[in-house]
Image (spheres, rainbow, N blue to C red):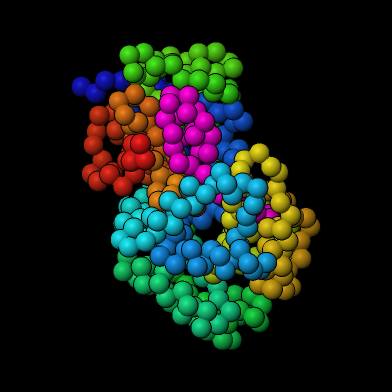
Amino acid sequence: MEQHKKIVVIGAGICGLSAAIWLRRAGHQVTLLDKEGPGAGASFGNAGLLAQWAIVPVNTPDILRTGLKYLADPNSPLFMQWSHLPRLAPWLLAYVRHGRGAGAQRMTDGLLPLVSDSVEQHRALTRGTSAEPFIATSDLAYVYTDRAAFDRDAYGWAIKRAAGYIPELIEGDAVREFDPMLGPDMQCLAVLRDHGHITNPGAYMQVLARVFEEEGGTLRRATVEDITLAQGRIASVETDEGSFPCDACVMAAGIWSKPLLKKLGIKVPLEPERGYHLHFSKPSQMPRCPMMIAGKFAVNPMEHGLRCAGTVELGGITKGPSRAPFRLIRRHVGKLFPNLTYESAEEWMGFRPSTPDSLPLVGEIGSTGVHAAFGHQHVGLTGGPRTGRWVADLISGRHPNIDLAPYDANRFS
């Protein structure tokens, strides 16, 4: 018989919520802790796309040349807090190194099982619950200025095609027939059919937390301060609201997992990619489906407005938002949707937890009983339910029918 355990999950973003729900369904006693409540970080501010096609790592073989070109271009989606560069340099060197040789293919091979059935994983997590209506089936349109711009993206499309993601190309005036909202500068679309998106990420996280509680889980708002080990294994999680004894722990705190693991003497090469969004309320128009504006940002028509999210700013977690990423998104939105008006635009900035090899850490850290479920870079919402299910299976003594070596939580030790 399966042994039911007392488990603490740290972090109520999509990875922590998914792990907590699947662990509770396996019969465990589960307490979910978060210092700000469900979905307060990157799980709130993401683009909302279930990016099953996001199998091309950011650090491709030409990342060094492309990165330098982007940093010199004020219209590029890459920004740098230069004061943070000395601290960031070792991570950046490893990031470039992992994109060389066979590294890019290894990362694609790892991303594919993590994201390729994202819509079904979200549906399995929510089936029959009040969270299910937040999952929408939709097409996804990559938007380019012209066919030449699409052709310059050949490396990424070759990887997608090999995985079965074959685009339908739409060019010229037919672009406006597909979506009249698009401006005249947009002359080429690459459309992927039958994908999906979340219609309101913040509300989705709140409802998932309610589902967890309705199914017998315990949700507590508390700041985790330390982790206590006894003879090398987890014994309790210490918070500002008291101590929580446990048999196992899931670390799903995103970028905040790094300082918590440091308390155990474990160094993880995790750095924040600062992501930005503008959320337009009461827009005069809505696109017919989510869009990726090639090399720029993502667009998602949501139930509460139009979200345009993207850009990468390399820097720390201490400084507030920069203005340049917001200005860039506004400029590009103006060219993409020249007739768009709206009531207001909410600005948001958050931290994507990123590893040097673009893959998350999933599984037990050593033999501590602490299980990692963080480091998803740009695919946290997409891969969260799959990650939560893997971790729940491991803790429950069931081996997932997949090789988890690419996500080994000890691979950087």
**Measured from the top left, where is residue 171 in percent x and y?**
52, 84
The span shown in magenta is 252-280
Residue 244 included in the magenta stretch of the image: no
* Residue 177 shows in this picture: no
Q: Nearer the viewer, residue 392 or 130?
A: 392
Q: Is residue 226 above or below residue 175?
A: above
Q: At x 71% / y 43%, what residue is drawn? A: 320
Residue projecting furthest to the left: 1
Q: At x 54% / y 21%, what residue is drawn? A: 225
Q: Assign the C terminus to one quadrant of the image.
A: top left
Q: Nearer the viewer, residue 81 or 278?
A: 81
Q: At x 31% / y 56%, what residue is drawn? A: 106
**Measured from the top left, where is residue 166 in percent x and y?**
37, 72
Q: Nearer the viewer, residue 177 or 63?
A: 63
Residue 175, image quadrant: bottom right
**Measured from the top left, where is residue 5 in percent x and y?**
34, 19
Residue 59, image quadrant: bottom left
Residue projecting furthest to the bottom: 172
Q: In screen coordinates, is 226 left or right of 318?
A: left
Q: Is residue 145 above or below residue 392?
A: below
Q: Nearer the viewer, residue 12 or 285?
A: 12
**Measured from the top left, where is residue 411 in percent x and y?**
33, 41
Residue 277, image quadrant: bottom right
Q: At x 59% / y 40%, what residue is drawn? A: 41
